[in-house]
Amino acid sequence: MRRMLDRARSDDGMSLIEVIVAMLVFAVISLGVAYSTVTIIKMTNDTRSRQVATNLATSQIDYARGLQDPFLVTNDEIVTTIGQRTYTLTQTVSWVDAGGNDVGCGTGTGVMQSKRVNVTVKWDNMLSTTPAVRVDTLISPDDRINDPNLGTIRISVLGVAGTGMANVGVTISPTSGGAALKDQPAPTNSDGCSFALKVTPGTYSVTINRSNSVDTNQATSPSKSVTVVAGGSIAALFQYDYAATFGLTYSAASGALLPTDLDTTFLSTYGAYVSSGGAKTQVLLHPVPSGYAGVAGKYIAPIPNGNQGCINVDPAAWPAGTVNGKALNAGVRMDNVAAAPQGSASMTIPLGSMTVTVPSNSYLFAVSVAGAAGSGDPGCAAAPTYSFGKLSGAKTIALPYGSWVLYYGANANGSGKLPVPASSVGLVGGVLGSVTTILAGGATVTLDPRTAK
């Protein structure tokens, strides 16, 4: 009997399994309570932040309306911290026509009636289910800005990043019909916009200017022609930014003389820009993000089924081939070099080199010609001439890639010049190319940018 009672007493209380189950149930309940508490706190904080964001958006709209001039209301972004929380306010604006369609300073064709203003506010650690605060309004000018008998010119100036360029001066002058403006437009605002209102119908030249700035054609004061019609609106669009500075190094044989009137071409996605008048130590160029490749000489792109241009100055135009039994790789131009607006970069301009001997006090000239048969020269239909000034004796000179005939003479203008004898010209060691004797004892010298296989 005692043993049975002892066995019964040993089964009193909770087993280990029951304890574990109870702890798990308690943990689940605790986690649920904690999650609910955290969620409530987050929702409370988010609601409080939304109230602050709403006040910020409303205040910004009130400020915009208080300016009492829609031309002063521009795109903007404001970041502010309130109560250890960061709020980002984004203001987006656009003119709209009578039908409610957007009319940007560089887009659309409608007549500006009023300006739509949208203010959006977001904040740090927003709940994923919470939309941003958004407030919209329309602001109309106090005075009439349109006239059915007159027109509007909208000027848009954007930089390489696609953002507006501020403080760009604008000048508008009539070129056919029209009339001189009573007042020139104000410089561009932070959106890169300026407007000329109530303009007499006719054709006008719109010119922009800002210190140290250039467009994609490297013009410092580019112009666009626009035609204004009664009751209409026309846009003049420019891509214009602060220039980048490129320091230039001309790479040729040691001590080689460069032509005094050398051209240098800068190739980019916008085409070819030629800097003339001799070698430069630096140039200011539009800051194209993909950069420029510099080549010596005046590159002229070929016209399909037309002029072959002048492409032999570009190493990349020389195909792989075999010259005088030597296999050559295709030519390769220097890598593109890029610089940011108001930034700087260094660029190397390669040339070919040769030796020449001329009589004392002779003026030396180089004339571009077609390459000899089998030279692989892709050609230059423009046939430019370069000058080296007055020289004496043996010299090393540098020229753009291609084929050349050298002449010497007693006159700076080249009158009465004679071909330099073939025996007086030669290639500098290591430079690929050929010297081919021509009539009158001269020589065609081909400077080849390719490398041997």
Image (cartoon, rainbow, N blue to C red):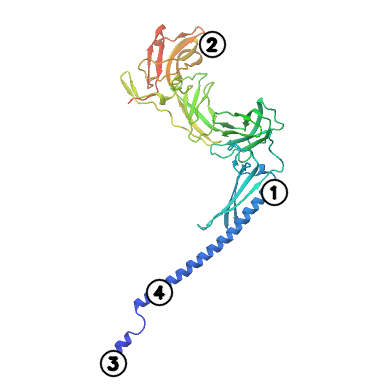
Check contact, mark 1 vs mark 2: CB within 8 A: no
Between 209 and 249, which is closer to the camera in this rendering?
Answer: 209
Q: Nearer the viewer, mark 3 or mark 1?
A: 1
Between 442 and 285, which is closer to the camera in this rendering?
Answer: 285
- Residue 413's tag is 2
- First in sequence: mark 4 or mark 2? 4
Residue 83: tell me if it is visible: no
- First in sequence: mark 1 or mark 2? 1
- Residue 213's tag is none
- First in sequence: mark 2 or mark 3? 3
Other-residue count near label 4 (Cα within 10 Å), few / some / many at <14 / 14–19 / ≥20: few
Check contact, mark 3 vs mark 1: CB within 8 A: no
- First in sequence: mark 3 or mark 4? 3
Between 143 and 54, which is closer to the camera in this rendering?
Answer: 143
In the current view of this chain or complex, which residue is farthest to the bottom? 1
Q: In the rendered image, which residue does mark 1 sit on?
A: 66
Check contact, mark 2 vs mark 3: CB within 8 A: no
- First in sequence: mark 3 or mark 1? 3
Q: Position of residue 72 (x, y in %)?
A: 66, 43
State the SS at label 4.
helix
Q: CA distance from mark 1 to mark 2?
A: 70 Å
Amino acid at circle 3? Arg
Q: Nearer the viewer, mark 4 or mark 1?
A: 1
Place residue 231 in its image quadrant.
top right
State the SS at label 2.
loop
Residue 230: tell me if it is visible: yes
Q: Position of residue 361 (x, y in %)?
A: 51, 10
Other-residue count near label 2 (Cα within 10 Å), few / some / many at <14 / 14–19 / ≥20: few
Other-residue count near label 3 (Cα within 10 Å), few / some / many at <14 / 14–19 / ≥20: few
Q: In the rendered image, which residue does mark 3 sit on?
A: 2
Q: In the rendered image, which residue does mark 4 sit on?
A: 23
Q: CA distance from mark 2 to mark 3?
A: 138 Å
